[in-house]
Amino acid sequence: MNKKIYAANWKLNKTPEEAREFVIKLKNDIFKIPDFFSNREVMIFPSAFALEAVSSLCAGTDIQFGPQNVYAEKSGAFTGENSAEVAKSLQAGVALVGHSERREIFKEQDDTLNKKVAVLQSLQVLPVFCIGETLAQREAGKTLDVCYSQLNNGLKEINKELRLVVAYEPVWAIGTGKVATKEQVAEVHAKLFEYLSSQGFKNVQLLYGGSVKPENAGELLKIPHVDGFLIGGASLQPDSFLKISTAQ
């Protein structure tokens, strides 16, 4: 059985010093829990300026980390972009791709995201590929059409033998306090798993994201094919992040 994944997306928050304080406290708290990593994976996605701080404190631990965004080329004349190759040199083992805020605010398209996934795979960095529908798309009954399109175009011609993590985040539930119902999450995750399996993906896990909190984490974890969470606001404090990571 795969371990449950608890991924912290800090977005545009935390100075390097604040990142260090978080990781130090998280490590100390995890140390008090016997066999914590026997059935869990922890991933931290800091902002670019805090990546090295997180790297230095996660070295030699089971806490994984990586950038929130990378460019589709490893290096070159691309001022202001983040290099996956540099992240790899800092021992990053994971990276976010296609978060809804990248899609919505920065207008990232599926073909660009596809190139990013390919670059990460070439570096043996695990992509955490984000998908999800807007409220208007859900109300129009297009949830699955949108998700399938994002998967089909964003993951075309990548290596389906390699491990992949897909994070389903309904855009209308991110940072709004609204959470998809158990029935909505169960339906979408079941369909996504079925679709990815039919497309030949051999090693894929599905995360749910969207206003996940300690109060609802346990209930959501019981849903089939929910293999963990991509957590936003509730991941900014080590106490709430750890409560989610230990929810029953």
Image (cartoon, rainbow, N blue to C red):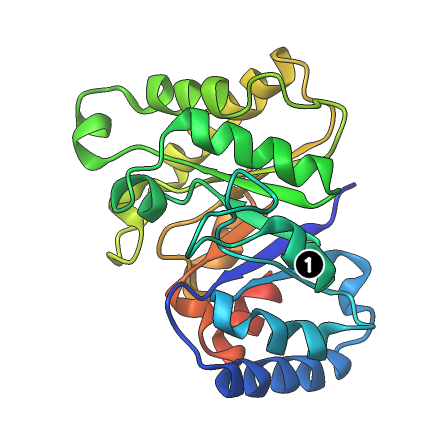
Q: Nearer the viewer, residue 5 or 45?
A: 45
| Tally of marks | 1
Give the side of residue 171 with respect to residue 124, left or right: left
* Viewer-nearest residue: 22 or 184: 22
Q: Quadrant of residue 150?
A: top left
Q: Is residue 187 visible?
A: no
> In front here: 128 or 87?
87
Which residue is tagged 1? Answer: 92
Tell me the quadrant of the picture where the N terminus can be found: top right
Query: Is 35 situated above or below 120?
Result: below
Residue at 65 percent across and 86 percent down: it is 24
Q: Is residue 207 visible?
A: yes
Q: Position of residue 6 (x, y in %)?
A: 59, 58
Q: Quadrant of the C terminus?
A: bottom right
Name the residue: 73% across, 49% down: 3
* Image position, residue 235 (x, y; %): 47, 69
Q: Residue at x 49, y 85 (%)?
A: 18
Question: For the view shown, which residue lies furthest in the top direction?
Answer: 198
Q: Is residue 85 above or below residue 139?
A: below
> Which residue is more in the foreground, 245 or 197?
197
Residue 169 x, y percent position in the rendering: 39, 42
Residue drawn where x is 51% and y is 28% of the image: 114
**Residue that sits furthest to the front in the current view:** 77
Tell me if 61 is positioned left or right of 27 in this view: right
- From what the image shows, is residue 38 above or below residue 236? above
What secondary structure is found at the residue carrying circle 1? loop
Amino acid type indicated by mark 1: Ala
Crowd around label 1: few <14 · some 14–19 · many ≥20 (10 Å): many
- Residue 65: where, in percent of width, then height? 64, 62
